[in-house]
Amino acid sequence: MTDVNNYDRVQTVIAIDIAKQSHDALISWPSGKTRAVKITNSLAGYQRLIDVAGVSPESISVGFEPTADYHRNIAYWLQAQGVCCYLVSSLACARAREMLFKTWDKHDRKDAHVILYLMQQGMMHPFYHPLVADTMDIQELSNTYHQIAIARTRCQHSIINHYLTLYFPEMERYLHSSRAEWFCRLLLKYPTPKSITRYKQATFVKRAWDIVGRKVAKQRFLEELYETAAFSIGLPVEANSLAEATFKLQLERYLTLTQQRSELEQKAEVFLSDRDDYQHLKSVPGVGPIIALMIIAESGDLRRFRHYRQYLNFCGFNLSAIQSGKTQGRYHLSKRGNSRLRYAYWLAAVNAIRQTENSFRCKYERYIRQDPTNPDLRRKARVAVAAKIARVAHALVKKNSDYRGFYEFGHGT
């Protein structure tokens, strides 16, 4: 993915080891002269780097190793000045460091030498900045949704495995969906069995009627819940105690996170509805609004990958094996790409093979036909389907078309 033609025209190469407070830079001029410079992580430091280079920004090539998000600010400023920015793989840096210095220890100035060496060998690829590519809002929306989903899952596990286990263990069997807000609203009103049984059954049914929402046989459900509370083994904590207050605090937090997640889903649908690539991705079986959001946020413009194999490498779906002499190792996923992107396609694969009929489910069933009960084979089949969905997604966006299903005769036989 390196733009060789552009790189050949570059006269000055700068390798930067990124840090939080300051950066170690190594400047190499065409004459072979090099100079190490330490700059602060500020506009003054960025300008000093250009001044020390002493050439026009258009003739400078800068390479750096991705370091959390600290590299994005300086990369954006440099690109705005006309500098060509490149990323160098962290794995390549580690291997090159061992080769050049015969040791595994890490040092900032040494790392700048390693980055410069890799750039001189052409082992880098152009830096793709989301703000420049106009995908910053999408990426931040996806990242925020991811963080809220993680916090919500942890809160849910805490409610189920700690609070319900102590105060109302029988209540867990009524939780059939993680999106059932009525469950938390009911627990907020009646967090313990004692808070239910302090009323008569008819009174409880009347008071809780509107909380549980629309249900089939609501009367029977509430009466059963009352009987369950009457014979509960939960700890008899007092009403309005500190223990009950902390339980309610977690329930309120869970509801807040649920509402925030729903709001982000609605914002994502409104914000992306006009994008062609979003609509094309949603046409793929197994890909919904959130998975499509994750794919666009992590991939950017899929058209920038000239061949689908480049995209599979970017995702980490490419196969690799160890070969030495007559020994040929088994092929397995390299897993060197974007893990969030692989996770998105894995979720899409799981959804697709659960649907009634599509080409992805056909591929899955053909893959496991020889031994359907083998869990390892089923896992490999899901990975193969995920890689196929990634390949299809790249083709649809590149050709600007929706997915068209082809139904096979004799499906499932």
Image (tube, grey):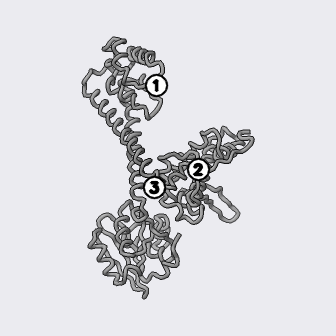
Q: Position of residue 103 (x, y in %)?
A: 45, 69
**Which residue carries the number 3 mark?**
297
Could you say where residue 72 lies in the image, as x and y percent from the top left? 37, 64
Mark 1: which amino acid? Answer: Arg
* Amino acid found under the numbered disc labelled 2: Ala
Q: Earlier in the sequence, mark 1 or mark 2?
A: 1
Q: Label 3 near label 2: C-beta < 8 Å?
A: no
- Asked if labels 2 and 1 touch by Cβ distance under 8 angstroms, the answer is no
Quadrant housing residue 332: bottom right
Residue 353 quadrant = top right
**Real-space Cα separation, disc 1 to disc 2, in angstroms:** 33 Å
Q: Along the line of sight, which residue is nearer the eye, 62 or 320?
A: 62
Q: Earlier in the sequence, mark 3 or mark 1?
A: 1
Which mark, residue 173?
1
Pick whichever, 297 or 386, lies toward us.
297
The span from disc 3 to disc 1 (Cα, nearest Å) is 37 Å
Q: Is residue 111 above or below residue 5?
A: above
